[in-house]
Amino acid sequence: MTSPLDPIRSRLAVGRDRAARLRRRPALGVFARLSALEAEVQENRQLNRRIAELTDVVGELLLPVADRDEERVRQALADYRVRL
């Protein structure tokens, strides 16, 4: 004999089973992926800064000799070497 509560009990059992399966899943979710993305963004920022610094040094070296400030070139190269 079936009870009028059988469909509710069945749905409750399905819900409990789904909740149990979700609790057993590895915690690789959104937070782990977000942390990885933040680390990659930080690395890209550092690389972009180094590229900008290198571009400045190259630009300084490529100026015509008459317009170039030798002391400024030496200082730019020294600063770049320190940052490496």
Image: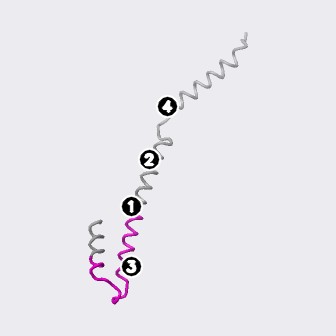
Q: Where residue 35 is drawn, which disc sits there?
A: 2
Under mark 3, the amino acid is Gly
Rendered residue at 62%/25% (across/down): 14
**How many angstroms separate mark 2 from mark 3 (CA)?**
36 Å
Cβ atoms at labels 4 and 3 below 8 Å apart:
no
The secondary element bearing badge 4 is classed as helix
Q: Is residue 13 left or right of residue 67?
A: right
Say which residue label 3 marks.
59
Depth-wise, is mark 1 or mark 4 nearer the camera? 1
Residue mark closest to the camera, 2 vs 4? 2
Identified at 44% across, 47% down, the residue is: 35
What mark, if any, has residue 46 been given in the picture?
1
Inspect the image, locate mark 4, and give the three-letter code of the amino acid beneath it.
Arg
**What's the mark number on residue 24?**
4
Q: Amino acid at mark 1?
A: Gln
Q: Amino acid at mark 2?
A: Ser
Q: Tell me where the magenta segment starts and ends, as one range.
A: 46-74
Q: Viewed as shown, does residue 83 lie left or right of 11?
A: left
**Dot placed on the residue nearer the N-terminal end, 2 or 3:** 2
Label 2, label 4: how many angstroms apart (C-alpha)? Answer: 22 Å
10 vs 33: above or below: above
Within the magenta stretch, is there residue 13? no
CA gap, disc 4 and disc 3? 57 Å
Q: Dot 3: few (<14), some (14–19), or many (≥20) neighbours within 10 Å? A: few
Q: Position of residue 56 (x, y in %)?
A: 38, 74
Q: Residues within 10 Å of mark 4 (few under 14, many from 20)?
A: few
Number of numbered discs: 4
- Which numbered disc, 2 or 1, marks the residue closer to the eye? 1
Label 2 residue SS: helix
